[in-house]
Image: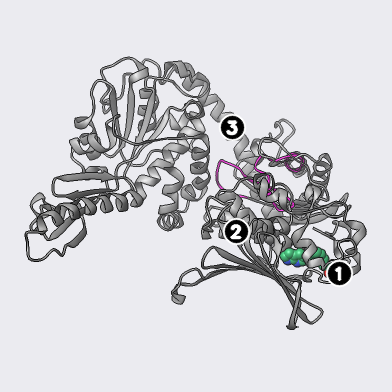
Amino acid sequence: MPSKKSVKDKKNTPTANAYGADQIQVLEGLDPVRKRPGMYIGNTAEAGLHHLVWEVVDNCIDEAMAGVCDTIKVKLLPQGTISVEDNGRGIPVEKHKVTKVSTLQTVLTTLHAGGKFGAGGYKVSGGLHGVGVSVVNALSEYLKAEVKRDGKLWAQEYTAGKPQKQVKLLGNAKGTGTKITFRPDATIFSVTEFQLKTILDHLRQQSYLTKRVKIIVYDERDQDKSRHLCYTFYFEGGIKSYIKHISQYSEQKHDNVFYIEKEHDNINVEVAIRYINEYNETLLAFANNIYNAEGGMHVIGFKTALTRTLNNFARKKGYLKDKDANLTSEDVREGLIAIISIKIPEPQFEGQTKAKLGNIEARSAVDKITSEALETFLEENPKDAEGIIGKCILAARARVAARAARETVLRKGVLEGFALPGKLADCSSKDPKNSELFIVEGDSAGGSAKQGRNRETQAILPLRGKILNVERARLDKMLANNEIKSLIIAFGTNIGEQFTIDDLRYDKIIIMTDADVDGAHIRTLLLTFFYRHFPDLIHQGHIYIAQPPLYRIQSGSDVRWVYSDEELNQARDEMVATKLATAQKSGQNKKSARVEIQESVTEPAETTSEEAAESDKNEIRLNIQRYKGLGEMNPEQLWDTTMDPEKRKLKKITIEDAEKADEVFDILMGSDVAPRKRFIQTHAKSAQNLDI
Ligand code: 0RA
């Protein structure tokens, strides 16, 4: 967008004059955007739809970063409309030197080649967004821009990017700011409903990355005002607050979060660190508020600085003796939570998903700022230093011990020659190509599955209780766990360095758990286990999730199983229609042709076939049972609905699915049990969505 400040001059308040015609290089109409929306916003599905919001919000964040805006309001309105309002400077309204129309209209109706106006300026956001509000306008069936500036309120409305009238002066106004209200074009987007969760997650993150800006989200889509919702995000400490948030449920290794914000080489660097009592590392890197899933130069600079600084300090203070080896980069990253956020004038994004920062200069800037500040922090906070260095040294010792243990374990061949586990009901076929292994939660469901299965091709392995928390456990400990050992022996592949996919005994490994919170938890545990230790089984498409039905719906002799609420509605409509047709035919002989539909949703136990039978021709009885657990189905029903290869639904697990399960793992597996339980309860639904 016009007049975006470089990092260097962002502290000087730019004047309206700083934004001038000379900064605008190429201006183009909006036709290309409507012709090829994907080029500008990635796609026209849910992600693309939300990109429109991010785009407008990015502009507000730019204002906040310039220190001229402290509040951003996002309002979800009925009929797919959304508004984004800030109290920034307001888009200039005066006549534009090049276009000879209002600058407001110019900003909203012209596309800038390359997505950037002017040289030297930078947008807070790069990557896929950062294309300009004009793109939002082009892809909206309706857009209204309102600007408060110089004591006046101005507005202009657009249809599909075309101004309906000139910019109009509406009257006087207090303060300054911009409000963009828009409704994405339903002829362009395949989805037009905004997802509150997506919006909250994104804005919460943006708010952490932009300290002291208040972001308020209102959900006012419901007709019923009492159901309107409002969420406020405001983080005084920016990424320092973010670190506290991420580590809140974990056992912390030290009290003070390390935090630095500094500029070097025109690059603004912010780093925050805390160590917790875990084995894995959580590292989030951002460049210009874009999450860099694939890392990049800033991450490399950070890791080098971290290892070097901690080693130097540990030696200097005698934590590491002359004879001790250096801490490895693995050692210093065990239990580390780190956030790196940089602002750089011309970010270059590389990699498969354009999520990796390529700027070489970011590496030295982050390295320099991190090492200097971390050394000072350690010197000034000896207690924190002790906690951090202690954790790293422990990690180093554990690494050495674990290697030794693993070597003995593998040498002894703990898994080799082991008989198949006793509770495994194996299939009779020895041909892996048509063999399947069902991993079933609990003994009772395991019993039904054993009875209902096709013995030739389907093997059943019931798992008792929760499997070991694989995230925390090292290989040697894991191999001592019976549930884990049973799984690995059943697979036939061995584990770790000994893993051989050619020895896999089943083509499909199917996780079959209940559709409830515990089921979701066990599924997450298993997926994490596969993700961490058997990624090849996922990559090669061997891991599946069974999908038991959610409901059984019966009308007379017509019985159907359905797997989602949509399917339930559809089945219900069909059954009612069929019944109506029959009832009306026979009803012609009767006095009353009125048909009443009785619908009841019952717990399985309450339903008997007598009750479900039709008692009166004028009444349609639909019986709907909600299935909660596998244990509620008898062996035949389990076979019919969930195991029969001809009828069942299976979901193949992709590496992304497993990755998501792994992400929620931190919270699920934190050492503190109460908040974990709370998380699972409040997120049971989304956790299921993640896993299934
Ligand atoms: C052009 C120039 C200036 C600010 C903006 C656009 C601007 C755009 C949006 C979109 C949403 N909120 C916004 N706020 C500002 C610079 C204005 C100046 O220098 O006075």
In the image, what residue occupies the spot 18% across and 35% down?
Answer: 636
Pick whichever, 202 or 306, lies toward us.
202
Residue at point 30% right, 24% down? 421
Where in the figure is residue 127, as x and y percent of width and height?
72, 47
Q: Quadrant of ligand 1?
A: bottom right
Q: Amino acid at mark 1?
A: Lys
Disc 1 target residue: 95
Query: From the viewer's perspective, is residue 104 above or below residue 119?
Result: below
* Vertical placement of residue 256 versus 275, above or below: below
Evaluate whether residue 48 shows in this view.
Answer: yes
Q: Earlier in the sequence, mark 2 or mark 1?
A: 1
Separation of marks 3 and 1 at Cα, in angstroms: 67 Å
Q: Which residue is mark 2?
A: 184
- Residue at image mark 3: 399
Extreme residue toward the right, this view: 22
Cα–Cα span, label 3 and label 2:
54 Å
Label 1 CB less than 8 angstroms from ligand 1: no
Instruction: Report the residue that reaches farthest toward the front.
Output: 588
Q: Residue drawn 45% across and 35% down? A: 653
508 w.r.t. 167: above or below: above
Q: Amino acid at mark 2?
A: Pro
Residue stretch in magenta: 275-303
Q: Is 258 placed left or right of 508 in the picture?
A: right
Location of residue 304 in the rendering, given as x and y in whole percent from the top left corner: 76, 38
Q: Is residue 535 left or right of residue 564?
A: right
